[in-house]
Amino acid sequence: MIAENFRQVLEKIEAAKQRRLKVPKDAPVTLVAVTKNHDIAAMREAIDAGAEHIGENRVQEAKEKFSELERDVTWHLIGHLQTNKAKQAVKMFKLIHSVDSLHLADAINGAAAVLGKTQEVLAQVNLYGEETKFGCDKEELMPLLKGIDALENLKLRGLMLIAPNFEDKEAARPLFKEMYDIFTNIKKMPWERADITELSMGMTGDYEIAVEEGATIVRVGTGIFGARKY
Ligand SMILES: *Cc1c(COP(=O)(O)O)cnc(C)c1O
């Protein structure tokens, strides 16, 4: 089931790329399989079906799986990160999607310096006010991006959005469009270290719309693994 779901999600992504209007149809999309609350067996099934990118939202859960998995995959931290877990996060994750304050960026930079790593990060944007708890407000975005760019052991790769869980999935489309505009603008700006190529948006309910509007990374859990049991 998981393997079949995974292939279907890939097919839907390809179909959504063909429906793009403003965004180049051939611009690639990375599918991150979100494995939070799913066990190692499920993860291996997805990986054996071709999943190369794994997304976890908690450092502790990722750590427990990290040593047990025995598969060569790329790890993404998609959930909120507490500064006291920065070091563990830097050890495991290729890309941290959830940097929403300079305070957190500083902590990750410090941990990366100690470990001799350049940590790739995305800035998480909150376009919607209080609906979502995390993410940096639009007004604070430019200072955050510039602050991240100034840190020696960080490489800013782009932006991340968690859209509100709208009843009508089309309601997310204007947010995805707005994110794509911001992404296109910051791509053109001169940066010290940043290499801005990634726009992480779209989950099970709305990833096809996100791809149509220019997502370069989608994060899909339920659509691959089924409903999470808590
Ligand atoms: C859980 C989670 C996802 C995946 O959600 P689904 O609706 O199960 O696809 C994506 N992004 C983030 C940040 C998440 O926490």
Image (cartoon, rainbow, N blue to C red):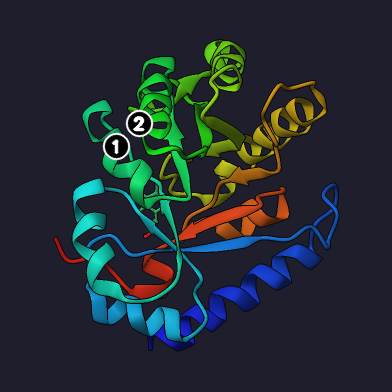
* Quarter of the figure that contains the N terminus: bottom left
Above or below, 38 against 174 in this view is: below
* Quarter of the figure that contains the C terminus: bottom left
Q: Which element is circle 2 on?
A: helix
Residue annotated with mark 2: 111
Above or below, 110 against 218 in this view is: above
Query: Horizontal and vertical percent for residue 192?
Result: 71, 21
Q: How many marks?
A: 2
The reply to whether dot 1 and dot 2 touch (C-beta < 8 Å) is: yes
Q: Which element is circle 1 on?
A: helix
Query: Horizontal and vertical percent for residue 68?
Result: 22, 72
Q: Amino acid at mark 1?
A: Lys
The image quarter containing residue 69 is: bottom left
Could you say which disc has been placed on residue 87 in the image? 1
Query: Horizontal and vertical percent for residue 125?
Result: 51, 28
* Circle nearer the N terminus (1, 2): 1
Real-space Cα distance between discs 1 and 2? 5 Å
Residues packed near mark 1 inside 10 Å, few (<14), some (14 to 19) or many (20 plus): some
Q: Looking at this view, is 187 or 86 the one in front?
A: 86
Q: Looking at this view, is 208 or 79 the one in front?
A: 79
Label 2 C-beta lies within 8 Å of the nearest ligand 1 atom: no
Q: Looking at this view, is 111 or 50 the one in front?
A: 111
Q: Is residue 182 left or right of residue 63?
A: right
The image quarter containing residue 85 is: top left
